[in-house]
Amino acid sequence: MKKISTLLLVTLSIGVFAQQQTGRISKGSMGFGLHWACPQSELKDIKYDDGIGIHFTYLSKKMPYKSPINFQWGVRMDFGNLGKREFENIIVEDNGTILPGGATITAGNTMYGLFTNGRINFLPDGTKLTPYMDAIVGHRNYSTHQTLSLNKPGLNPEYESSDVVNRVVHTKRFHYGGSIGVNYQVSPAFSLESSITYTFGEIGAVLPLQDIVRSEGSNEVNYTNFQRVKTDLLLMNVGLRLHLFKNYDNINAQRPKTTNSQRENTGNRDTNATNAQSTTKRERVIPGNRNTRNTTTPKKTPQIKSDGLKRDPNARK
């Protein structure tokens, strides 16, 4: 009786747990979107150009997800093009030979950031409109590139027809900051986000586009006018967040009690049939075998009639 009670208790516990786990359990989310990058502080004072970019984020599941204030951790990456400037009619040569068509130089600034991200949500999981705050720590790169493009590559088949890119100025600095935003859940599968992010950056070398010059009558572009300033940046973000789930099936829905009863009854019949066949087989193979579980008189084992010579029944006497 004690064993049966324990078995019933374990079965009931498993059933309750299965019902609680039925449905979809959050495994985190992936976000991506666009942002407008605005240089701040000393970077703004030297008139470093604004630009547009993209960002990607991964966030863990909310912990604890039923709490009105919950926490998530993750990573964030952002990229941005912060303006371009072209210089046309560049004369190019090789060992004194001028290449026909000339070339164009494009100077451009880019930005890249990689951060660890911690988020605090101020409403429980499943709320339609959720305000949040992010804290981010990582690094941000600022780079100035020069791209040389031949104006008529078909006239110069022996030379590089693709663009030749060189990095002229590059700086990588520690950044920290945060975001304030709001998440609007459109459906359980995805939501929309809007936020403002500000990061404080250490002093680094940067080159505004206006300080990239080409002297009149000269064929070269000068990149020596870079400056060392604080690299603060403001990002205005909009994006889409996809929610990742792990599915759990309802055990009671898949395996109803009637099905279990039928399966048990079927199993009993199969076992009995197998035992009956085994018993019959043993009775046939071993003449005179008595089945202790059978109260009826066992049948005699039939003998195969021989077509050979017959022995004299009096030969043994």
Image (cartoon, helix red, strand yellow):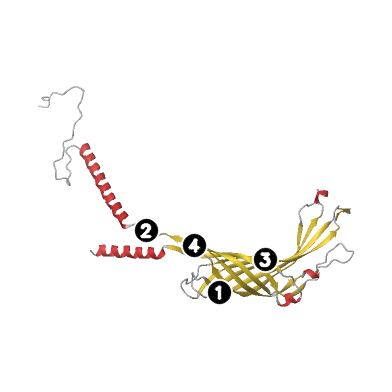
Label 2 belongs to which residue?
A: 253
Residue 283, disc: none
Residue at 26% from the left image edge and 48% from the top image edge:
269
Q: Quadrant of residue 200?
A: bottom right
Which element type, helix, strand or loop, lies under badge 3? strand
**Side of 162 relative to 298 (left or right):** right
Nearer-N-terminus badge (2/4): 4
Give the number of callouts: 4
Q: Position of residue 1 (x, y in %)?
A: 23, 63
Label 4 belongs to which residue?
A: 245
**Side of 125 relative to 108 (left or right):** left
Which element type, helix, strand or loop, lies under badge 1? strand
Q: Position of residue 24 (x, y in %)?
A: 46, 63
**Side of 173 relative to 297 (left or right):** right
Which element type, helix, strand or loop, lies under badge 2? helix
Nearer-N-terminus badge (1/3): 3
Residue 132, disc: 1
Q: Quadrant of residue 90?
A: bottom right
